[in-house]
Amino acid sequence: MDSTRKETGIVRELAGRYMEIALSDRHVRMRRRFKDSNDLKIVRPPLIMEEIPWHEMNMDGELDCVCENEELRQMEYRLRVQLFREKHFRCDNYIEPVWTIDKASQSTGIGFTIEERRLAVDRANNIVSHEYVDVLADEKSLERYHDPVVTAFPELDAQRKARAEEILNGIMPVELRGGYIYYSPWDQIAMLRGVEPILIDMYDRPEYLHRIMRLFIRGMSSEMDQRNALGLYDPRGISLHCTPGEVTLPHEPDAGHYTCRDIWFRTMAQMFSSVSPAAHDEFDLQYTIPLASRCAYTYYGCCEPLHDRIDRLKQYPNLRKIGVSPWADVEKSAEAIGGRYVLSRKPNPANVALRTDPEVIRREISETARLCLKYGCPCDITLKDISTVGYRPQNLIEWAQTASDVLDEFYGRD
């Protein structure tokens, strides 16, 4: 048997194990709960772990790949990661009975390039320190702006799909998918300038910041138009910023050609945690609301605490989900959210960085569950931004077990 045939057999064996899990009654119920939660039903909150430092997870060689062919090796690793999740993490590991391939595309961007210096403590970790150079310091720097040009690669998509179907024939179907919109202009601007110059300009040169933002919104509007025309959006998108986006759409989509009206719009302004609600509204919300309104639903928020400005977020006509970060007041957030939106809770990843204290985890998850039930909030819970677990995978195993036990107590075992 030649090496390629042997390696294909390894991938197929892993894929078979994966499909058994994906088709199990438990996972069918789990996927339904994700959809029910996004549809504003009170169910046991999906419990998710993402942005995991996988370079610290390889217990007993379970993530070691043996395939030498690069294409097969990538498939092998993806399957091993999912099987590892299911074996060790008692959470809602979203596993679909299908092999998904992202549609290939690229954008020229709008003409601005990040300049930075980096400092890494662990070179195996992609989480590093950044010091950004202000490349948008003056009016002249804005002259580099150009409208983006988006290119799709349908021939490459067809080749990749055909190859995956050849490898997985008879084991699992293969689907080519587009995605959702993830647009965070102030994250991008902060990387082009650094945070301090922006905060100073809010006071000294507010109109200059407005001019920058108008250029970014112009570019994104153009990109949305082009991606619509190219068929690069898809309500079955792979990930809504670490959470599945399954939801009942407000209309019947044209499955032959999805557009932005069929998908989620994901946005945030993380650096605005240090500005007033009024400034947040002026410099971010008023610009992104028109873009978000072109989509089916909006999911707002990430690491920034939003409990004191949820009333302003309600200006999004299609708002459906609000991020409640580790630094947010959970009770104020739950009271403001009620049953109108999904409370997307982000527990503190610092609690798994060195050692996991089950009592700390229990208090944090109990607070979320208790307040969501008190105020009638649909909810999901996502531990993310996990920079490190100190090379102790057990930290995440313990977190998942403890958090799941708490949800059992409040909502019943799934």
Image (cartoon, rainbow, N blue to C red):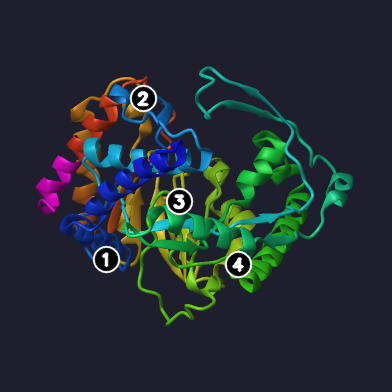
Q: Which amino acid does label 2 sit on?
A: Val
- Give the crowd class for mark 2: few <14, some 14-19, many >=20 residues within 10 Å: many
Identified at 55% across, 70% down, the residue is 260
- Residue at image coords 56%, 45%: 272
The residue at which mark 1 appears reads as 36
Of the numbered discs in the image, which one, if any, rests on residue 291?
4
CB atoms of marks 4 and 1 within 8 Å? no
130 lies above or below 345: above
Kind of residue indicated by mark 3: His
299 or 284: which is nearer to us?
299
Tell me, yes or no, whether the two marked residues, 4 and 3, touch with CB atoms within 8 Å. Answer: no
Left or right of 248 on screen, residue 121:
right
Q: Residue type at mark 4?
A: Leu
Is residue 413 in the magenta section? yes
Q: Which amino acid does label 1 sit on?
A: Asp
Quarter occupied by residue 294: bottom right
Residue 241: image tag: 3
* Residue depth check, mark 4 versus mark 2: number of the one nearer the observer: 2
Mark 4 and mark 3: Cα distance apart in space:
18 Å
For the point 67% across and 70% down, the residue is: 225
Q: Residue 389 carries which label?
A: 2
Q: Nearer the viewer, residue 299 or 63?
A: 63
- Residue occupying image coordinates x 25% and y 25%: 394
Separation of marks 3 and 1 at Cα, in angstroms = 18 Å
Closer to the N terminus: mark 1 or mark 2?
Answer: 1
Name the mark nearer the viewer: 4 or 1.
Answer: 1
Q: Residues in magenta? A: 404-414
Q: In the visual, does 253 lie left or right of 96? A: right
Q: Residue 24 carries which label?
A: none
Left or right of 349, for residue 122: right
Circles 3, 2 touching at the beta carbon (< 8 Å): no
